[in-house]
Structures are given as C-alpha cells and as structure tokens.
C-alpha cells in the first residue's frame, strides 16, 4: 500500500513515464514481503531499453524491473534508494520522507 503521495504527483509521474522519460516517485509503503522498509522510490520509464540502461548505470539488475505496462518501473529501497536519490539530486524526496543512510528502514 502506498501512503504520502498526492494525486497530482502520481499523475505527473505517470505522464513523464508515458513520454519515455525517467521519473521518480517516492512514497511511504508497506509490503509484508519487505517488513523492514517504510519507503520506496519507483523509477519508471515506458521505454524499457532506457529503463534497463538506467538500472545498469546505477549498478542495479534490470531483471528486477516490474514490466507492468503502461508504467514499467524499478523499486528502490534501503541504502540504494538514498544513494540514488542523492546522485539524482532529488533532495526534496530525501527531506520529505526523512531519508538518510540507515534510517529509512527498521533494523
């Protein structure tokens, strides 16, 4: 389940993804398969080749892409989430959700 994301943000993410551009959407999240994590960043792009290249460039395996048309995406969690958000300059995601290395999940 997703929490803490506004409809306008979700619609903007979907529009960017649909244009074949890479978009980032961070929100509070709970999934019983990953009980330690409280946030996720969905990195989406409808152009699978671009999304795969983005994964490789960031040291992530494209095999974990959720190929769910029309919004294929890769889920970032934990330390890698914070690392990528910092590298992408998405400090508003980090500040808004209180993300710091070691703090966006339960130990």
Image (tube, rainbow, N blue to C red):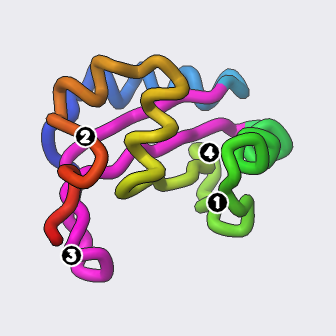
Circle 2 residues within 10 Å: few <14, some 14–19, many ≥20: some
Q: Secondary structure at mark 3?
A: loop
Residue 26 shown in magenta: yes
N-term-proximal mark, 1 vs 4:
1
Q: Residue at x 53, y 24 (%)?
A: 88
Label 2 or label 1, whichever comes before in sequence order: 1
At numbered mark 4, what does the secondary structure look like: helix, strand or loop? loop
Give how far apart the Cα atoms at labels 2 and 1 are.
24 Å
Range of the magenta residues?
Answer: 22-46
User: Mark 4 or mark 3, which is nearer the start of the sequence?
Assistant: 3
Please say whether residue 49 is one of the residues in the magenta stretch: no
- In the image: residue 99, left or right of residue 10: left
Q: Residues within 10 Å of mark 1 (few under 14, many from 20)?
A: some
Q: Secondary structure at mark 1?
A: loop
Q: What residue did someone put label 1 on?
A: 65
Q: Are marks 3 and 4 in contact (CB under 8 Å)?
A: no
Tell me the CA gap for discs 3 and 4: 28 Å
Q: Which residue is mark 3?
A: 35
| Residue 11, numbered circle | none
Q: How far is disc 1 from disc 4 in space, using C-alphas?
A: 13 Å
Disc assigned to residue 70: 4
Task: Tell me which numbered mark, 3 or 2, is placed earlier along the sequence.
Answer: 3
Ranked by sequence position, the earlier of labels 3 and 1 is 3
């Amino acid at each position: 389940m997703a929490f803490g994301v506004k409809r306008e943000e979700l619609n903007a993410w979907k529009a960017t993804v649909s244009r074949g551009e890479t978009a980032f959407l961070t929100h509070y999240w709970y999934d019983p398969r990953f009980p330690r994590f409280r946030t996720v960043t969905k990195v989406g792009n409808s152009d699978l080749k671009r999304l795969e290249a983005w994964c490789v460039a960031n040291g992530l395996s494209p095999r974990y892409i959720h190929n769910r048309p029309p919004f294929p995406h890769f889920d970032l969690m934990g330390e890698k989430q914070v690392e990528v958000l910092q590298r992408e300059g998405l400090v508003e995601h980090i500040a808004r959700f209180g993300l710091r290395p070691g703090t966006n999940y339960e130990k």
